[in-house]
Amino acid sequence: EKAKWPKETVDLWAKLSKKEANDIEAIQKSIVHHVTTTLARAAYNMDNFSAYQAVALSTRDRLISRWNETQGQLSKVDPKRVYYLSLEFLLGRSMDNALLNMGLKDTYDKSIKKLGFNMEDVIGSEVDAALGNGGLGRLAACYMDSLATLDYPAWGYGLRYNYGIFQQRIVDGYQTEFPDYWLNFDNPWELPRLDISIQIGFGGHVQTIQDEYGVTRHSWVPNQSVQAIAYDVPIPGYDTENCNNIRLWRSKPTRVFDLTSFNEGNYEKSVEDATNAEKITSVLYPNDNTMAGKELRLKQQYFWTAASLHDIVRRFKKSMREWSDFPNQVAIQLNDTHPTLAIVELQRLLVDEEMLSWDDAWEIVTKTFAFTNHTVLPEAMEKWSVPMFEYLLPRHLQIIFDINLFFLQKVELKSPNDRGLLNRLSIIEEAQPQQIRMAHLAVVGSHKVNGVAALHSNLIKTTIFKDFVDYYGEEKFINKTNGVTPRRWLHQSNPQLSKLITETLGSDKWLKDLSLLKGLAAKTGDAAFRKKWMAIKRANKVRLAELIKERCDVEVSPDALFDVQVKRIHEYKRQFMNILSVIHRYRTIKSMTAAQKASVQPRVVIFGGKAAPGYYIAKLVIKLINSVAAVVNQDPAVGDLLKVVFVPDYNVSVAEIICPASDISQHISTAGTEASGTSNMKFVLNGGLIIGTLDGANVEILEEVGEDNIFIFGCMAHEVEDLRHAQRYRGVPMDPALQGVISAIEKGTFEDPKIFQPLISTLTVGKDFYLISADFASYIAANQQVDAAYKKQEEWSKKSILCTAHMGKFSSDRSVKEYAEEIWNIKPYSVKDEGYL
Ligand code: C3B
């Protein structure tokens, strides 16, 4: 188009599309411009929220310039890109992060101050984008930050839910859920791309025809159709001009949604079905590590993978390359099994629509995809019932059966006459009705499969994917230990510590090369430095104490040891064991003389996290925590020696306040159940020590910080099976301390014990699946070691510094670089500052 313009038009565009200036005056002008025009407000009726909106819009202008420049240059250069398919992107707030990454925070700070507003209040007015449940969704967000920061050409693809993860309120000690209608006010962090609309089909039937060469061809004739509309979310890198994109799809009715009812002249039904189209991207399923098996979820998965693939294929086709070049231009990472249908959809597009042979298509598909597994919990394994699947996606079902057939034929050639093996490897589980095992499909359709921490990656090779390792060989199954972005999880959330580190190391290079933190280790002998370090921790604890006062109406002393467990509530994460140990501590203190009490280390035990709305036992754990808190916090015999709080509605922005403020945090899953954990990394990065089991990334954190700087307890992953067996068949008695705690609950120390009976019965001999009794004694002992260590404040401050110093490995930059080099085979491309025309 540009080529057709006369020179003066081109020059005019070039002159006018210069990037925004970033001096204080220009920024203030842009803020006031948005106040008076976009928001149609005046200075005298402004509140913090409208100030936030105006500052957000001004920030957005600068983001979009970079986004445009990056995307424009990338389409010209057309390098190989990675597409990260994730049903969850748990981004949290955007403004602070965008300003810091673009290097504009200080200038905006000054600009806002002079306009009569305070940066913290403005930032505090932003609602979280909570399009995720927990670790998996937040990992995707950290990876997007690192991909942009490292200049990798990468796009995320996800869904634009109208409702994010529910808001949690505590009523009478119980969790209650409220819808998170986060789009109530315009969302300045997205660009609606109403021009990008893709038709997605559902249902219908498959037509079989002979083509002119006598080859049988299939073509899917859906009987429903939905539109996917693109919303783009710019992701700026830190200290680079590059700005990547997350494309989120929203479902809208097509003009004719249900072709059957329309053709039958059933007007009312076709309007009703149009409303159903919007439902597809209405709500994020609130389950973490469990599969609900709902039809609407399957629709979400197909809607999202089909729209994303259509988009990716369209972009590829613009380059006029051979199909065999597709894997040289495109890498697709499957974040868990949720996007596995993308494998089937690409095979369908290549075979049915692009007319490639099955084998050529399948080679392209398997070279393109790679799959990350995030859990070994059986209840989390995605399976779809064949009849439901067939009704929604009849052609895809045929393709899955063909993929399975060809795969099992090869297995049979390698290991003849092994029916058991075929059954175990099959993508189809022979149940009533048959089930599609999505993890098997993901393994068969990918060239690399990775776990998310060393222990977990080994575990999947010996458990859920053992037979696949025997068949494919070891090389296909690799490890990529998770990481977190130091920009959000230190620089942004702990600005004072970030500043001290930069001063100490002589530059801020550590923010892009986290291994430089090791330079802090030399400072443990410097008493003045230790004092500054601990003063910052204390200031962060004061900030958290204020939040606790505001949200829980409990006063806690910032001089007590802050003990934190914040994560989704799940039996395998053992918040139950934690609160049981708190009861033990309470009973111990109650039994002490005044003299004994004088030597007790005061502790504030802080819980937070959401339970899936249908997860009854997890919700009872929340109730128990609150019942214990109610008794302990007002017991004068205990006073400040022990406080217990449950911080409601734990989310990313709350985590940003909690992580910098912990002295110790709890990562205490039954060994072998927590694939990695990522908050463990965030806490240690901020100079908090951890107490934990030899599970997930704890193992690697231990390797990095050394055993003097971490509190490890409990059984090991390889012992779990024997312990379960022993308690089931040899009647191992319950731990005596635990027995005492249970009796106290049963005596009604904390409300009506009847309430907690279902919870307690999960522990009765033979049933204690998560081995709380087996680990209880060593857990109590480890907690006593924490108390003793914390009393030696000088020693503790050294441990705290060493913890941060040794966290270099756990930057998501390291993780993403490994993925890029060992799985995706992509190279960085740095945007040149040349204006986007
Ligand atoms: C989580 C795992 O439970 C964590 O151990 C892990 O650190 C993160 O993924 C990121 O890898 N996970 C999750 O949040 N949701 C799932 N459905 C499965 C795993």
Image (cartoon, rainbow, N blue to C red):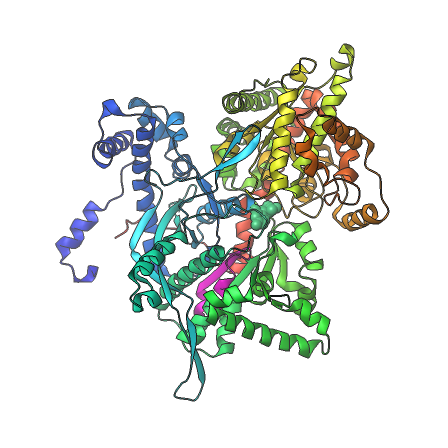
Relative to residue 551, is residue 754 drawn left or right? right
Relative to residue 745, is residue 533 drawn left or right? left
Q: Position of residue 168 (x, y in %)?
A: 50, 35
Q: Is 333 one of the magenta-colored residues?
A: yes
Q: Is 493 one of the magenta-colored residues?
A: no
Q: Position of residue 462 (x, y in %)?
A: 71, 58
Task: Mark yes or no: residue 504 visible.
Answer: yes
- Pick whichever, 339 or 227, lies toward us: 227
- Pick whichever, 782 or 87, lies toward us: 87
- Pick whichever, 88 or 16, lies toward us: 88
Q: Position of residue 416 (x, y in %)?
A: 72, 78
Specify the quadrant of the image occupied by residue 321.
bottom left
How many labels were placed on the picture?
0
Task: Mark yes or no: residue 523 visible.
Answer: no
Relative to residue 315, is residue 784 drawn left or right? right
Relative to residue 768, is residue 726 drawn left or right? right
Asked if residue 561 is positioned above or below residue 357 in the image, the reply reads above
Quarter of the image with the N terminus in it? bottom left
Residue pictured at 66% horizontal, 66% vertical:
468
Residue span colored magenta: 325-344
Asked if residue 337 is positioned above or below residue 495 in the image, the reply reads below
Asked if residue 439 is positioned above or below residue 88 in the image, the reply reads below
Specify the quadrant of the image occupied by residue 475.
bottom right
Residue pictured at 43% horizontal, 39% vertical:
180
Residue pictured at 51% horizontal, 70% vertical:
397
Specify the quadrant of the image occupied by residue 406.
bottom right
Q: Extreme right residue here?
A: 730
- Pick whichever, 161 or 345, lies toward us: 161
